[in-house]
Amino acid sequence: MFSHTCPIFLHNYIILMAKITYITDDNQNHTIEVQNGLSVMEGAVQNDIPGIDADCGGGMACATCHVYVNDEWFDKLPSKEDGEEDMLDMAFEPKKNSRLSCQIIVSDELDGLTVNIPSKQG
Amino acid sequence: MNKTDALIIGAGPTGLFTAHQLKLIGLNCEIVDNLDKIGGQCIELYPDKPIYDIPAVPECTGEELTKNLINQIKPFDIKFHLSERVDEVKREADNWTVKTNNGTIFSTPNVIIAGGVGSFEPRKFPVKECEKFENKSVLYSIKDKSIFKGKTVTIFGGGDSALDWAVELSKNSKVNLVHRRDDFRGAQATVDTVKELAKDGKINLFTKYQISSIKGEDKLESLDIKNDDKETKTLKTDYLLGFFGLIMQLGPIANWGLNIDKKTIEVDTEKFETNQKGIYAVGDICSYPGKLKLILSGFHEGALAARACFKLARPDEKYRFEFTTSSKTIKDRLGVKSD
């Protein structure tokens, strides 16, 4: 169970984390541990990763947390909910592998996920 | 020149309730908003989404909340300046002189910024060269459709604005409609009309394509579109229209000498005043230790900022705290009968 996650022992609780790598437009890699259950957007915002604005705060209403997901990971993610593709119409330079990072929830399965942050959010 | 006790920037829920509080304590105010309607993010981003954390309102949508707030300020005479963006705020003697992009000028001792995440602006084409033709042949909204008569117009987008204009302009212009995927998010009836018109050759439909470059020296001549398989097509065009919705941008607020960190303005928690005397920030745009981006926090912040405005607007009077349940003065202002 722990082979893919990094547990942090805190008092009596075990918080499960997954390693997420954010690659910014200037090719800087930021690998951080994000708690399971948070979104990839929240992981970026809480850790001051530049380039994710998340203006609407995760409501799937603004398309400013747009990321590109590496091909090897794209198909492993839970599929898009209604409305995400609609919002991606408005994103800056959407591609086939575009996702809204507020809709990707971190879990054990996503340990090692890599996302690329576009040059702009709008 | 409009003289007012307080100018509110932003007609979202926080701006509206702040106006209510100002009027209740006997100050007048005017509101400026860059959107063409009242309601801010509530009306632009989530009019139909239910909100569950407004005190004493178990559930309401963004639109319902806005309607109720408008009802609540109905007793008062508040002037709205919609589709206007505040560009300049300058100190002149004891007042702030505020200018909008439409040339409206206000003089006021109090400016309350209730600007959310900034003003809503159209999202633009990712191709940088488009800036050169912006407002000439590259447009993000239409003011006068007659300019397109007999011309070739290339429209981008998959929502109602893009589809409605494609249908409308196809009557008198040659229309190309380009969208990044096969599905459209506009109303089904309009999507059907567009597909009919495309079948009849009245609209040239290009799906799964996006803009890659534009050409033209003094005037726009053509653009290239590219699909996911990197196939490119060149389209001759006179006009380029982009309908990608709106995005919030801090915009000119950044130039007013305020302490700004991560798109929010630092304030104190007594008056919600910024580092500039007489300029306050309330709602999502303000920050202080413990700030919560909730609508209810915005209401509290607006109520306190309104009291702070009183001091600067009525320096010779003393503010007296009163309850709406018992104050005759307040009931008179509300136009309700006193017991």
Image (cartoon, rainbow, N blue to C red):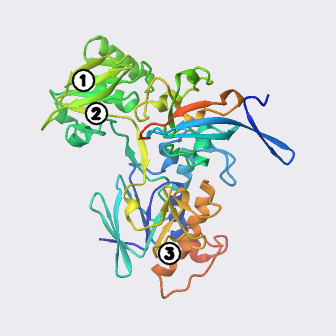
Q: Which residue, given by chain and number where applicable, does mark 2 sit on?
A: B241
Q: Quadrant of the C terminus of chain B?
A: bottom right
Q: Nearer the viewer, mark 3 or mark 2?
A: 2
The amino acid beneath tag 3 is Cys
Q: Position of residue B317 (x, y in %)?
A: 51, 86
* Distance CA(mark 3)–CA(mark 1): 53 Å
Q: Quadrant of the N terminus of chain B?
A: bottom left
Instruction: Evaluate whether residue B72 shows in this view.
Output: no
Q: Position of residue B34 (x, y in %)?
A: 38, 52
Q: Earlier in the sequence, mark 3 or mark 1?
A: 1
Residue B102's disc number: none
Residue, x 70% and y 31% (percent of image)? A107
* Distance CA(mark 2)–CA(mark 1): 11 Å
The amino acid beneath tag 2 is Leu
Q: Given contact means CB atoms under 8 Å apart, are the residues at marks 2 and 1 in contact?
A: no
Q: Nearer the viewer, residue A2 or B139?
A: A2
Q: Position of residue A58 (x, y in %)?
A: 58, 41
* Distance CA(mark 3)–CA(mark 2): 43 Å
The amino acid beneath tag 1 is Val
Q: Which residue, given by chain and number where applicable, does mark 3 sit on?
A: B309
Q: Are marks 3 and 1 on the same chain?
A: yes
Q: Residue furthest top?
A: B199
Q: Residue furthest bottom?
A: B316
Residue, x 35% and y 30% (percent of image)? B162
Q: Position of residue A79 (x, y in %)?
A: 60, 23
Q: Earlier in the sequence, mark 3 or mark 2?
A: 2
Instruction: Using the image, name the chain to which the residue with label 1 belongs.
Output: B
Q: Is residue A56 above or below residue B118?
A: above
Q: Which residue, given by chain and number where applicable, does mark 1 sit on?
A: B175
